[in-house]
Amino acid sequence: MPIPHFDDLRQPTLAILSDGEIRKKSDLILPLQQHFKLSNKEISQEYESGKGAIFPDRISWVLSYFAMTGLLDRPKRGYYVINELGRKYSKKSSEEIIEYVKQKMMEREQGKQKHQKKFIVTAQTDTVESTPQEQLYNSYQDIRQVVYDEILDTILSKSPAAFEKLVVELLQKMGYGGALDKSGRVTKQSRDGGIDGEIREDVLGLGRIHIQAKCYQREKTIGRPEIQSFAGALLGSNANKGVFITTAQYTDDAKKYAETIPNARIVLIDGNKLAEYIYQYGLGMQVEQTIVIKKLDTDYWDEIPNNTNSNN
């Protein structure tokens, strides 16, 4: 039997999870294998690139999309549990589940103005009208978003002190502090006065970037009062540069306030931007796969004489 299509895995996956048990991906392989009556050889079949088994990878994507569209919760990194919305959809048809996920993913993309994925989904055919290059780019963005979620889930499993160290290391990775030895440091806990770390920008320490780091649940919002408190800590330290980094989100009021603080510049980095920077600058990341796409070197081919024989 061929390995089930990605869409075919959705309904049975939700049905298995509908009992409310917390599971990781590997817990779903056997029950789904039995559901589709697949052999061990079939579930071990790998991609042509050799980069992993197809069946477990498709299960991973099903779980990721369910989490991104609100059907599953992630109580900790790599684990999934169904919620009320997911339980509701576990009783629906495969087509209804597919349509729900498709619509939610489209809403997510519409909210990401900077990416503006260019695709048209038709209700009749459920096909994507785009070039292979556009599809490749869109798939790349989807993969990155899944990794962003994994990054944030991993961070939330660490201690607040480890998070403070992480953000200092990230800013150094981004080039702040330059080539200075020990340009960044975490301040002592309970005596930091609202400042969790700092980066020295030059040898003499004339320029300093102060850091506030808050490791909160992703759905939490940080409001204006916390930004005001950080601004006060900056002024109390005779500093005028600050970065507030969190795994959570900022309210619109907090963002507006940060832009209007007199005598200080505070940059806000939320959870999504934090994950993006960690990915972009390769902090704690490794390359999984590189795809090389080649095109003709027209200069090379133009130097080769054309066939002038009109009979050929």
Image: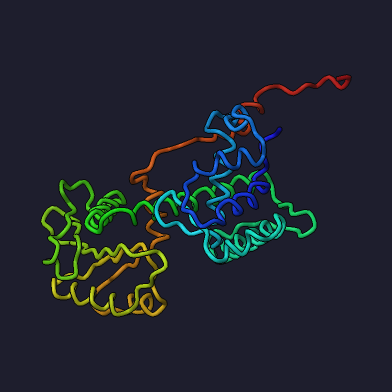
Camera-side residue of 212 and 180: 212
Place residue 76 in its image quadrant: bottom left
Place residue 306 in its image quadrant: top right
Camera-side residue of 305 and 191: 191
In percent of the image, x 36 and y 51: which residue is there? 154
In percent of the image, x 33 and y 65: which residue is there? 216
- Which residue is farthest right? 311
In percent of the image, x 57 and y 65: which residue is there? 85
Camera-side residue of 247 and 16: 16
Please state, as top left, top right, bottom left or bottom right, where the C terminus lies in the image.
top right
Number of marks in picture:
0
Res 173 visible: yes
* Residue 262 higher or lower than 173, as above or below: below
- Which residue is farthest front? 19
Say whether residue 172 is left or right of residue 5.
Answer: left
Say whether residue 223 is left or right of residue 291.
Answer: left
Q: Residue 174 location, x and y as percent?
A: 31, 51
Q: Residue 187 location, x and y as percent?
A: 15, 60
Q: Residue 275 location, x and y as percent?
A: 40, 55
Say whether residue 27 is left or right of residue 163.
Answer: right
Res 299 visible: no
Place residue 159 in its image quadrant: bottom left
* Residue 79 higher or lower than 307, as above or below: below
